[in-house]
Amino acid sequence: MTKAGITLPSVGGRPKRCTFTSQPQALHFRDIKLFEREIEKLRKDPQRNPSELQGLAVKSILSASPMFLVLFIGVFFLLPLVIGFASQIDVAAAARLKAEGTHTQAIVHSNEAVSSGSSCSRLYYEFKSAEGLTYSGDSAVKENSPSCDLEKGDTVTVSYLAEDPTVSDIESRLAGVAPSLGFFLTLPLVFLVFLFMFAPTLVPDIKRALGHRKLYKNGRWAEGELIFVKEGKASFSPGVTVPSSKLIFKFTSSNEQTIEAECEVRNRWLTNHLQPGQKVNVVYSNSKPNKAFIVEAYIR
């Protein structure tokens, strides 16, 4: 296998060199036939189904992009936020009971042991409001709390809201208020910073693929010619790069204009198996022909 290259006009005083890989003729012929067999299965007329081209299926677009991994990690970062919001319901009620609650003695109805979390039991009790009406309530009792040893018929101090006596809790439990929502926001904020760092690289990849998916459905089909492969790397994050190559090609549009365009791909295997001068299949639109892409880039 040999490599050749061409030197392009300098950019910013530094000449850029594009390389392409030439494969043995037998291997090159086999790869062309592979592409041809897949192309024959595709519909050339408009109203195509983008999913018939495997690389344009939504599942392939997401799985091929690092964004899929980022979102997967994000689920675990966001779980504390969900837990935090759920806990705020109890925290808000506890805060009101501490600030506005009316204290009274309640009779223990039952004390059922539990073996989950930090609670030793769940206490069920009944009390009478200032109006003489009877209300019932229950509360989780933490380990090492004196309330763990309460039995049926014992008394316990509870607080309730005068305007809504159905909201109540045992007094000793109100002393320990759950962490504030700010505590649960810590990990999601870390994820947002992480996403902010990677988004500039991740979003364009998905946006470009979805744009090609839309173009493939109603775009025009033409035969083009690969001019050369511009190999390089794209920054994935500070200090991390991934292969990123541009396929430079030309084709003739329906109005007999010769159009030169480029298609960015992250598939190094593909760029190693496409040779300058090789015929390729192109999908384009007359309104923006320079936004065309090579169909072979999405064959899997």
Image (cartoon, rainbow, N blue to C red):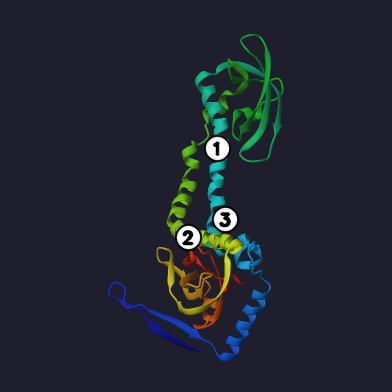
Label 2 vs label 1, nearer the camera: 2
Amino acid, disc 3:
Phe
Residue sitting nearer the eye, 278 or 184 = 278
Residue at mark 1: 85
Marks 2/3: CA–CA distance: 19 Å
Question: Does dot 3 land on a helix, a strand or a loop?
Answer: helix
Q: Position of residue 234 (x, y in %)?
A: 43, 68
Residue placed at 57% from the left, 59% from the top?
214
* Label 3 neighbour load within 10 Å: few <14, some 14-19, many 20+: few
Along the horizontal axis of the image, is 116 left or right of 73? right
Residue sitting nearer the eye, 271 or 116 = 271
Residue at mark 2: 204
Residue sitting nearer the eye, 249 or 207 = 249
Amino acid, disc 2:
Pro
Marks 3/1: CA–CA distance: 21 Å
Give the mark, 2 or 3, whose residue is nearer the N terminus.
3
Marks 2 and 3 close (CB-CB < 8 Å): no
Residue placed at 62% from the left, 85% from the top?
30
* Label 1 neighbour load within 10 Å: few <14, some 14-19, many 20+: some
- Hey, which quadrant is residue 42 in on the image? bottom right
Q: In the image, is residue 79 above or below residue 298?
A: above
Residue at mark 3: 72
Question: Which part of the image, by quadrant, shows the C terminus?
Answer: bottom right
Marks 3 and 1 close (CB-CB < 8 Å): no
Q: Position of residue 215 (x, y in %)?
A: 56, 62
Q: Return the residue found at the far left.
A: 13
